[in-house]
């Protein structure tokens, strides 16, 4: 099992209302799950909990049989660097680094991902080139350019390559398509899902755009899953 969530409650500040209250949520190895819910339903907060960025005040979050809820923050940071690839809404590329250096960045923070890269390529740079080629960025003259010179379509591919390098077991993409037009959006999803399959990674994809859900094994409504989401259907009285 890649993700096992049991009885978690989370509030951003002590004493404030819970924004996440989830009884049970599972993601198996290699599974692709589409997480759907309106703005404010807790998608990003759930990802922060699964990534060990924050800890629940109650309950447990296990990723790859590791209980993150009882881990100190610095160990959670290491665990995240080793096992989780994030693709953010605005891609969050480092503006002063080249395309190639953005992609190899996770290998600087994770010995495990560096080792895994070495099993399939000569160096992180060579693996970054291979991934960028696979993602359709085979114009090598671009690889040394700062990412600020790139189009949105190129930046999204860099963000995918950075999430995938060193084969983390869990990829989380948080509304990565909201700034893209329709054609680009579908192409983005094809590329992302194909690469996750090739690497054997589980994929969690958050969006409020249901049209994208057909490429997934399963669809989860956060309004139904998260008892703290606003607009949660009330129990009949
Ligand atoms: P979604 O990603 O589905 O739009 P979020 O997880 O961002 O939902 O938000 C859920 C709730 O948590 C909202 O009420 C939001 O205002 C609040 N929230 C999100 N991030 C933070 C934060 N860093 N600090 C305080 N409150 C936050
Ligand atoms: Mg969000």
Image (cartoon, rainbow, N blue to C red):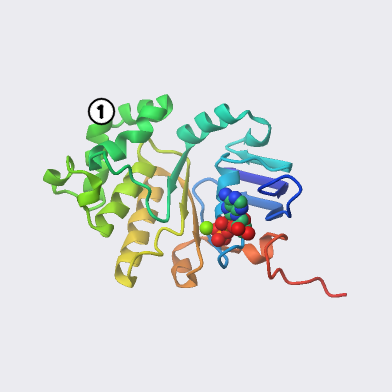
| Extreme residue toward the bottom, this view | 236
The structure residue drawn at horizontal position 73% and vertical position 55%, both measured from the top left corner, is 17
Left or right of residue 82: residue 37:
right
- Residue 42 appearing in the image: no
Which is more toward the observer, 116 or 42?
42
Left or right of residue 226: residue 101:
left
The structure residue drawn at horizontal position 55% and vertical position 42%, both measured from the top left corner, is 51
Left or right of residue 63: residue 226:
right
- Residue 197 appearing in the image: yes
- Residue wearing tag 1: 123
The structure residue drawn at horizontal position 69% and vertical position 46%, both measured from the top left corner, is 13
Which is more toward the observer, 152 or 237?
152
Measured as percent of width and height from the top left, residue 42 is found at 61, 58
Measured as percent of width and height from the top left, residue 168 is found at 44, 38
Q: In this view, does 24 lie above or below 217?
A: above
Determine which quarter of the picture holds residue 187: bottom left
Q: Quadrant of the N terminus?
A: top right
Q: Residues within 10 Å of mark 1 (few under 14, many from 20)?
A: some
Measured as percent of width and height from the top left, residue 128 is found at 26, 38
């Amino acid at each position: 099992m890649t993700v096992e969530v049991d009885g978690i409650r989370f509030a951003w500040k002590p004493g404030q209302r819970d924004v996440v209250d989830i009884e049970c949520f599972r993601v198996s190895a290699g599974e692709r799950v589409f997480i759907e819910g309106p703005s404010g339903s807790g998608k990003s907060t759930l990802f922060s909990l699964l990534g060990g960025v924050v800890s629940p005040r109650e309950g447990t979050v296990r990723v790859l049989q590791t209980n993150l809820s009882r881990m100190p923050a610095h160990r959670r940071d290491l665990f995240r660097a080793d096992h989780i690839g994030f693709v953010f809404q605005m891609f969050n590329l480092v503006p002063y680094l080249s395309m190639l250096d953005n992609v190899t960045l996770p290998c600087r923070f994770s010995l495990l991902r560096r080792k895994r890269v070495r099993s399939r390529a000569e160096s992180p740079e060579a693996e970054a080139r291979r991934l960028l080629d696979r993602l359709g960025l085979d114009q090598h003259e671009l690889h040394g350019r700062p990412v600020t010179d790139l189009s949105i379509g190129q930046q999204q591919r860099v963000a995918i390559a950075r999430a995938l390098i060193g084969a983390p077991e869990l990829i989380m993409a948080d509304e990565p398509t909201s700034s893209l037009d329709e054609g680009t959006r579908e192409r983005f999803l094809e590329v992302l899902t194909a690469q996750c399959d090739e690497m054997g990674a589980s994929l969690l994809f958050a969006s409020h755009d249901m049209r994208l859900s057909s490429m997934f094994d399963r669809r989860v409504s956060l309004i139904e899953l998260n008892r703290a989401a606003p607009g949660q259907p009330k129990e009949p009285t």
